[in-house]
Image: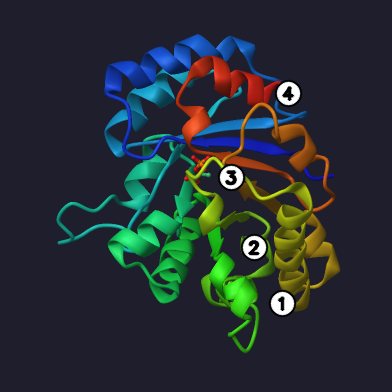
Amino acid sequence: MRIPIIAGNWKMNKTVAESVAFVNQIKDHLPATDQVQTALAAPALSLVPMVQAASGSPLKIMAENCYFEDAGAFTGEVSPHALYQAGVHHVILGHSERRKIFGEDDEMINKKVVAALRNGLCPIVCCDDTMGRRVANDDKIHWVVGRILADLKGLTTDEIRKVTVAYEPDWAIGSGQSADPSQAEEGCYLIRQTICDMYGDDVANDVRILYGGSVTPDNVSALMAKNDIDGVLVGSDSLDPETFLKIVNH
Ligand code: PEP
């Protein structure tokens, strides 16, 4: 059985004090981890105090990014080894903002996925998708299939089971216009089929696939009712504790 994940992505928001206050406000109101796993991805500066604040609660604290080397002359980067040692055991990789604004490509994201796993981190790998590409159908293979083949290249069966994928159509992120549940299911299904082609049915049935893009307390239930949607990645509506709790406890 795939235990659903509901994960917030704060992006570059909140001070350290605000982050800790948020954790303290929600940590006693979360579902048991055998029902739903709850996680928050926060800016690097807030991670250690958030891990301390969340200690003993079901809440997992995630990084929003990391580098693909463990240590060295990489000014400004975040080490996957240091994250793990600090108690941060999950990391978002390949978010569409990292791809678009910071120029990360599939090759770099694949190296980051490998480095995260090598250091014991469980990655949530984001797979974008644009309306333009869907309408034009101009790729030889569907965009989503190409992303998954490239970003997850070379992982062992044990490693792929530790990966979560988040299907995030570009046009739905931060737009207030969520994909409807059948569109979201179509993307998540395609990702699962691609993992099935790479690793077989058993593995594909174990890997969790999330939907992300304008998830709210009003649309979360319909999205998560779909077969291949094992949870959600939430941006804007994870910034307010009460709204986030409504999504988690929908
Ligand atoms: C995101 O940035 O991953 C995201 C899903 O954002 P939002 O919920 O604001 O669309």
Mark-to-mark CA distance, 3 and 4: 19 Å
| Mark before the other along the chain sequence, 3 or 4 | 3
The x and y percentages for residue 203 are 78, 63
Residue under numbered circle 1: 198
| Mark before the other along the chain sequence, 1 or 3 | 3
Mark-to-mark CA distance, 4 and 1: 34 Å
Pair 4/2: label in front:
4
Q: Look at the numbered discs 4 and 2 and tell me whether their residues touch, using CB distance below 8 Å.
A: no
Above/below status of 216 relative to 2: above
Residue 26 is left or right of residue 65, and the answer is right
- As drawn, the label of residue 163 is none
Residue type at tag 2? Ile
Residue type at tag 1? Met
| Mark before the other along the chain sequence, 4 or 1 | 1
Residue under numbered circle 2: 160
Pair 1/3: label in front:
3
Residue under numbered circle 4: 250
Above/below status of 149 relative to 44: below
Pair 2/3: label in front:
3
Mark-to-mark CA distance, 4 and 2: 29 Å
Above/below status of 156 relative to 62: below
Residue type at tag 4? His
Residue under numbered circle 3: 177
Name the residue at 61% across, 23% down: 58
The x and y percentages for residue 68 are 35, 63
Q: Of residues 148 and 67, which is closer to you in this image?
A: 148
> Secondary structure under badge 1?
helix
Mark 1 neighbour density, 10 Å: few (under 14) some (14–19) many (20 or more): some
Name the residue at 70% across, 34% down: 220
